[in-house]
Image (cartoon, rainbow, N blue to C red):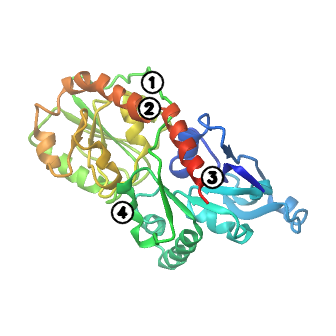
């Protein structure tokens, strides 16, 4: 068994614009691997009818039935099971860990980092409203956390979100998120006589979306120079000076083009889109709850946790065309100080080294 390296278990279809665990692996881990970390990417996707029988009894392959929306059929993912020769296996969601629980030996050390701003079962329930599946997912997250030896969070404040699942046997480690540098030279020709605001993400209460729309409509009755762009899937939103972009593949260009980006989570993990926005030098109007307490009192971050969002948006001294110009370099300096890929690589190496060296 390999005892001097940690393998990151990655059973994901990873794309540039992925969110959640696939996005974290693409933006943080790929290209930033230290010498003591290996990334599992040996994933083959084949038609289930062809391979289900062929590999049914092969012990060196793990099979899992999934549904492929693009091909409209079921497929089986075959993952090279050499990963189970590693003593230290690092998972990035409870569902992937749960699928392979039966393949893990008691001698293996399981590292788990869950990325949702609420318990995974609750996050999925917010999407599908399926009570039966909620009960199943609660059992999945419970058993996954019980098997985990090491839990990883971006900071101590994030741990609060998972208190129900943490027990005294867990070894807690902290790994501040960092991403490889992103760039955009595109500025969309949106009206510069308006102050352009952008919301990207899921349209639900946890993300603060519904209250944003309510407040924005109220504010624009008094202030006519604000314009809101919305990106992401969901029911179409209409309103004066509201522009629903739907699903987009050019998030970085939109972040680069607007004056402010919203991040209004009612409870927060440590969102990649916040770091991406900082990297591009665009100011944020955001809540600083849980994991996002890190951003309290930071220049270029307009905090609406205690300050009223309505009052902030009505303030022409704060929400102005000059604000971005005055804070762009400050935000980029924050990225350089805390969030570069190289700094993340060093932190990841140190966390894994501590896990490996602990008896």
Q: Position of residue 244 (x, y in %)?
A: 36, 43
Residue shown at 72% from the left, 72% from the top: 102
- Reading the image, the residue beneath label 1 is 184
Q: Position of residue 292 (x, y in %)?
A: 32, 49
Which dot, 4 or 2, sits closer to the camera? Answer: 4
Q: Which mark is residue 160?
A: 4
Task: Please give left or right for residue 312 compared with residue 76 in the image.
Answer: left
- Reading the image, the residue beneath label 2 is 252
Q: Gap in Å between the C-alphas at discs 4 and 3?
A: 26 Å
Of mark 2 and mark 1, the one earlier in the sequence is 1
Q: Gap in Å between the C-alphas at discs 3 and 2?
A: 37 Å
Above or below, 227 against 219 in this view is above
Residues under numbered marks 2 and 1 in contact, where contact means CB atoms less than 8 Å apart: yes
Q: Gap in Å between the C-alphas at discs 4 and 2?
A: 30 Å
Mark 2, other Cα within 10 Å: few <14 / some 14–19 / many ≥20: some
- Reading the image, the residue beneath label 3 is 356
């Amino acid at each position: 068994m390999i005892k001097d390296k940690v393998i990151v278990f990655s059973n994901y279809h990873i794309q540039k614009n992925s969110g959640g665990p696939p996005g974290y692996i693409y933006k943080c881990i790929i290209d930033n691997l230290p010498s003591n970390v290996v990334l599992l990417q040996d994933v083959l996707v084949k038609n289930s009818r062809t391979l289900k029988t062929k590999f049914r009894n092969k012990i060196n392959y793990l099979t899992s039935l999934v549904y492929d929306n693009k091909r409209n059929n079921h497929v089986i993912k075959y993952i090279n099971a050499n990963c189970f020769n590693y003593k230290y296996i690092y998972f990035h969601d409870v569902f992937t860990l749960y699928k392979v629980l039966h393949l893990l030996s008691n001698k293996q050390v399981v590292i788990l980092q869950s990325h949702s701003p609420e318990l995974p079962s609750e996050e999925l329930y917010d999407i599908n409203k399926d009570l039966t599946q909620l009960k199943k997912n609660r059992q999945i997250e419970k058993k996954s956390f019980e098997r985990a030896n090491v839990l990883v969070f971006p900071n101590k404040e994030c741990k609060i979100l998972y208190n129900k699942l943490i027990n005294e046997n867990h070894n807690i480690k902290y790994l501040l998120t960092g991403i490889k540098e992103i760039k955009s030279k595109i500025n969309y020709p949106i009206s510069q006589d308006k102050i352009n605001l952008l919301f990207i993400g899921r349209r639900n209460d946890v993300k603060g979306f519904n209250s944003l729309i309510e407040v924005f409509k109220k504010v624009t009755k008094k202030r006519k120079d604000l314009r809101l762009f919305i990106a992401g899937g969901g029911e179409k939103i209409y309103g004066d000076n509201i522009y629903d972009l739907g699903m987009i593949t050019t998030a970085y260009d939109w972040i680069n083009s607007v004056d402010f980006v919203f991040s209004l989570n009612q409870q927060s993990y440590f969102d990649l889109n916040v770091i991406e926005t900082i990297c591009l030098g665009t100011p944020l109007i955001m809540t600083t709850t849980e994991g996002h307490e890190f951003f309290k009192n930071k220049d270029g971050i307009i905090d609406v946790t205690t300050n009223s969002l309505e009052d902030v948006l009505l303030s022409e001294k704060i929400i102005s065309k000059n604000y971005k110009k005055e804070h762009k370099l400050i935000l980029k300096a924050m990225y350089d100080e805390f969030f570069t890929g190289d700094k993340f690589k060093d932190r990841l190496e140190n966390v894994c080294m501590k896990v490996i060296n602990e008896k």
